[in-house]
Amino acid sequence: MTFGGGACPVSVDDSYTGAVNAPAPIVAPSILAADFANLADEARAVEGAADWLHVDVMDNHFVPNLTIGLPVVQSLIAATSLPFDVHLMIEDPRRWAPGYADAGAYNVTFHAEASDNPVALARDLRAAGAKAGLAIDRDTPIEPYLELLPSFDTLLIMTIKAGFGGQRFIPELLEKVRTARRHVDAGHLELRIEVDGGIAADTIEQAADAGADAFVAGTAVYGADDPAQAVRRLRQLAERAAARA
Ligand SMILES: O=C(CO)[C@H](O)[C@H](O)COP(=O)(O)O
């Protein structure tokens, strides 16, 4: 399946080939930093440049912030051509996550801290036609979850504390990315390692060097005068880092 549509379309399904043939970096603008009064226009502003559109669903319970839910995401999916990368920062993901897969989200990610049976939920998401993602928050160690990774398509490692955009990137959290990358490559797993929080032109290369190959960026994209150009610049930097790996 190929999408991207702009200067650098990427083949996501065909490119999960591990370290030897490293897949092209994914850049996923987070609409958390967009103008919520104009979400469809904001999403369309990065069509042709972004690979995925990252949507943060927050419930004011799992995190102390409240954003949007399924009806808004359904409408947005219908309004844009981008694949949706839904990041659920919610309690009880077993109840809600399959609805996002049914709505046509490309990738549905839920938090390890919120799930008592992540593998079963990943199975449900895949059965509903979505990719399954597991997210790890700032204070959660990665090691207990490594053995679950064959059940997932994406591992999202927070590089801030989940809940709010515009926070400062925490470089120490890249140690989790390094650990995950070693495990993924050693096991030849077909899995994207995604980083989320404070990703910008001055941090994306560190994250790529650590082994991330999917990058969520909110403020760095929607805070820019030209969001599409900001996405292209981020991808260029990630590609540069990947080329020297
Ligand atoms: O998951 C998130 C917050 O919990 C956001 O996706 C993340 O913060 C992106 O925003 P920014 O690039 O501004 O840090």
Image: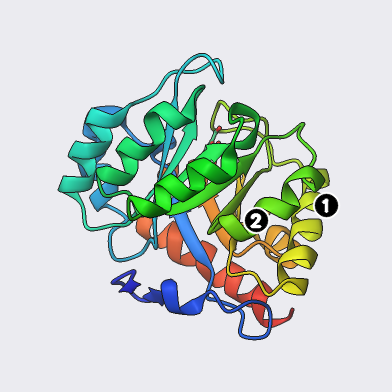
Q: Residue at x 67, y 85 (%)?
A: 20
The residue carrying mark 2 is: 149
Residue 169: name its quadrant. top right
Locate the N terminus and report the quarter of the image it occupies.
bottom left
Is residue 224 something that shows in the picture? no
> Is disc 2 surrounded by few (<14), some (14 to 19) or many (20+) residues within 10 Å?
many
Image position, residue 233 (x, y; %): 50, 65
Image position, residue 171 (x, y; %): 79, 47
Calculate the distance from the C-alpha at mark 1 to the C-alpha at mark 2: 17 Å
Task: Inspect the image, locate mark 1, and give the three-letter code of the amino acid beneath it.
Answer: Glu
Ligand 1 picture quarter: top right
Q: Label 1's element?
A: helix
Task: Inspect the image, locate mark 2, and give the three-letter code of the amino acid beneath it.
Answer: Leu
Is residue 84 something that shows in the picture? yes
> Is disc 1 surrounded by few (<14), some (14 to 19) or many (20+) residues within 10 Å?
some
Q: Front-most of 211 and 181?
A: 181
Q: Earlier in the sequence, mark 1 or mark 2?
A: 2
Locate the C terminus and report the quarter of the image it occupies.
bottom right
The residue carrying mark 1 is: 175
Q: Label 2's element?
A: helix
Q: Residue at x 66, y 82 (%)?
A: 243
66 left or right of 48? Answer: right
* CB of mark 1 near ligand 1 (< 8 Å): no
Do callouts 1 and 2 mark residues in contact (Cβ within 8 Å)? Answer: no
**Looking at the picture, does residue 130 appear above or below residue 209?**
above
Closer to the eye: label 1 or 2 = 2
110 left or right of 33? Answer: right
Q: Residue furthest bottom?
A: 20
Q: Residue at x 35, y 76 (%)?
A: 7
